[in-house]
């Protein structure tokens, strides 16, 4: 069996993966038997290159993906296991990754994951100990055979066996505001630097944004990483759900909903329209130079065959017309590149300059925080050296001098709703605290869940990454966002002085060990 990694790196073929959504209950459950039967049909289909299995999709508890994946793997088909950070901390994720490697699952789609939405006896407590970038970096380290350290950071002198994971990541640019779109691009770069070897985009319905993603990656040195397009088979019920924003990060506009409802009224309930729509999306991705497609929302093998068959009937240039048709963006939506009037897609020659954002998020607290930070934490500055000296010579160097600790604790609690994590990310997020103001404690860029700028967990208001982008954009330095070193928060610092930890080089800012980028996969995608 040729693995996904081999197919991505050694062939130029257009790949097709499909998704099997896990179920709640054991393998004996009716829905699991059905999912297993569907997977069995997919295994026999040579046009399907891999089968992806979801991990507690939508934030609901479900059967672990390995249970459904094992028979598929044993039958000789490549399986991509989805691994998310919402239900397991870094140790749980590492343990899960060792299990996957031992059982022969070598392809992982690493994601932050949806916020939990249910659980026995009430809502589950979310974990989010690390995020997707931290998870990708961890899997990449496992691929290199790392040297485990003890609690004090000392080597145990034992290099672990290398895993051989093909690591995938997800991105989305189907966002409304500039402060949502651009941080997603910056985070994508971070994922690739951390070790992502292929990228799948979010469900969306706008060819101009699809072409923009391809173009942005090409223009920012990300071309060698294969890009896979998401193709979702719609129906009127799902279109309504998407339109209502019931699935985090997925947008379906009113005109597209109207179209779906109209076709839903036809004699076949819109089945032929939706199959053709999905086939057109495949053709568009092929035409745009994506390396393959990820088929989702399809639970019937005959339907998948039908869609692939329709796509085969298209002429090579038909996708250009389809791309003009399927452009369901929202009024006022931000695009990084201008529209090419001839194609309706992103124009390589005309970047969109972007307007100067008047941000409601810039105020005296931001200016005061910036000024104080520069004064106290700039390398070589007198106050920086003085702070380091005082902490080093205090009774407890993890807390620093008592009056200073009280001042730190009080001022940060009042100004930033600080939770005293001891490994502070405030300067990297324009003085917004991810512990108190981000539902997922995201420290390496936004998750994909925003809706028109707001956090997927509504009570959190505007996403901290949008607010940070707007603060920096206000000063003309938005490109500085996410330029910081990868943050994997050290929970051992919780309750200690973040000032002392910075001055004495104990927090993440002192780490310079960027992960080694993976061997470049050869993207022979046409564009
Ligand atoms: S604040 Fe932003 S990054 Fe954090 S969970 Fe909400 S949408 Fe995601």
Image: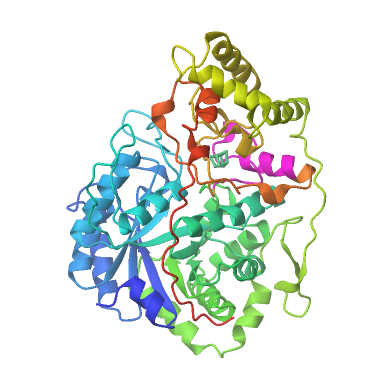
Vertical position of residue 48 compared to residue 432: above or below? below
Picture quadrant of residue 143:
bottom left
On the question of residue 158 being in view, the answer is yes
Picture quadrant of residue 281:
bottom right
On the question of residue 177 being in view, the answer is no
Nearer the observer, 497 or 98:
497
Residue 501 placement (x, y as % from top left): 50, 27
Q: Which residues are drawn in magenta?
A: 449-472
Nearer the observer, 130 or 124:
130
Residue 245 placement (x, y as % from top left): 57, 47
Left or right: where 317 falls relative to 473: left
Q: Is residue 452 magenta?
A: yes
Ligand 1, by image quadrant, is top right
Vertical position of residue 239 compared to residue 320: above or below? above
Nearer the observer, 117 or 161:
161
What colour-coding does the image apply? Answer: rainbow
Residue sticking out furthest to the top: 403
Quadrant the N terminus occupies: bottom left
**Count of numbered circles on the image:** 0
Residue shown at the point (47%, 51%) measured from the top left:
514
Left or right: where 266 falls relative to 476: left
Q: Is residue 428 magenta?
A: no
Vertical position of residue 310 compared to residue 275: above or below? below
Residue shown at the point (73%, 43%) measured from the top left:
472
Residue 110 placement (x, y as % from top left): 40, 54
């Amino acid at each position: 069996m040729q693995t996904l990694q081999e197919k991505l790196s050694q062939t130029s073929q257009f790949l097709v993966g499909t998704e099997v959504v896990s179920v709640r209950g054991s393998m004996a459950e009716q829905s699991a038997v059905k999912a297993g039967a569907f997977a069995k049909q997919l295994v026999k289909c040579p046009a399907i290159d891999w089968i992806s299995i979801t991990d507690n999709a939508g934030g609901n508890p479900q059967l672990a993906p390995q249970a459904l994946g094992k028979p598929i793997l044993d039958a000789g088909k490549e399986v991509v296991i989805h691994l998310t950070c919402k239900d397991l901390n870094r140790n749980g994720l590492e343990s899960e990754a060792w299990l996957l490697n031992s059982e022969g699952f070598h392809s992982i789609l690493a994601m932050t994951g949806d916020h939990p939405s249910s659980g026995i006896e009430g809502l589950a407590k979310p974990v989010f100990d690390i995020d997707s970038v931290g998870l990708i970096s961890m899997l990449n380290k496992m691929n290199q055979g790392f040297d485990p350290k003890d609690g004090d950071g000392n080597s145990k002198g034992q290099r672990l066996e290398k895993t051989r994971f093909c690591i995938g990541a997800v991105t989305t640019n189907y966002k409304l505001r500039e402060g949502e779109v651009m941080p997603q691009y910056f985070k994508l770069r971070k994922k690739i630097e951390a070790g992502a070897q292929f990228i799948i985009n979010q469900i969306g319905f706008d060819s101009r944004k699809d072409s923009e993603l391809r173009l942005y990656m090409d223009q920012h040195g990300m071309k060698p990483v294969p890009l896979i397009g998401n193709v979702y088979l719609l129906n009127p019920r799902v279109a309504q759900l998407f339109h209502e924003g019931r699935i985090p990060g997925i947008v379906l506009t009113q005109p597209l909903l109207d179209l779906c409802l109209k076709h839903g009224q036809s004699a076949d309930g819109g089945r032929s329209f939706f199959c053709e729509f999905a086939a057109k999306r495949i053709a568009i991705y092929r035409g745009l130079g994506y390396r393959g497609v990820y088929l989702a929302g399809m639970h019937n093998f005959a339907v998948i065959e039908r869609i692939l068959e329709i796509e085969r009937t298209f002429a090579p240039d038909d996708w250009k017309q389809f791309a003009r048709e399927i452009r369901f963006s929202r009024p006022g939506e931000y695009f990084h590149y201008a529209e090419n009037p001839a194609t309706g897609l992103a124009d390589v020659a005309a970047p969109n300059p972007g307007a100067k954002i008047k941000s409601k998020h810039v105020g005296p607290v931001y200016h005061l925080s910036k000024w104080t930070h520069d004064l106290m934490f700039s390398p070589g500055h007198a106050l920086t050296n003085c702070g380091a000296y005082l902490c080093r010579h205090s009774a407890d160097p993890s807390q620093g001098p008592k009056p200073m600790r009280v001042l730190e604790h009080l001022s940060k609690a009042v100004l930033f709703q600080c939770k005293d994590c001891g490994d502070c990310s405030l300067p990297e997020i324009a003085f917004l605290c991810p512990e108190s103001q981000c539902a997922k404690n995201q420290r390496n860029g936004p998750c994909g869940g925003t809706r028109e700028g707001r956090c997927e967990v509504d009570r959190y208001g505007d996403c901290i990454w949008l607010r940070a982008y707007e603060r920096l954009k206000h000063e003309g330095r938005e490109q500085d966002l996410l330029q910081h070193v990868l943050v994997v928060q050290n929970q051992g610092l919780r309750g200690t002085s973040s000032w002392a930890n910075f001055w004495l080089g104990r927090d993440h800012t002192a780490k310079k060990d960027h992960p080694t980028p993976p061997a470049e996969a050869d993207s022979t995608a046409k564009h």
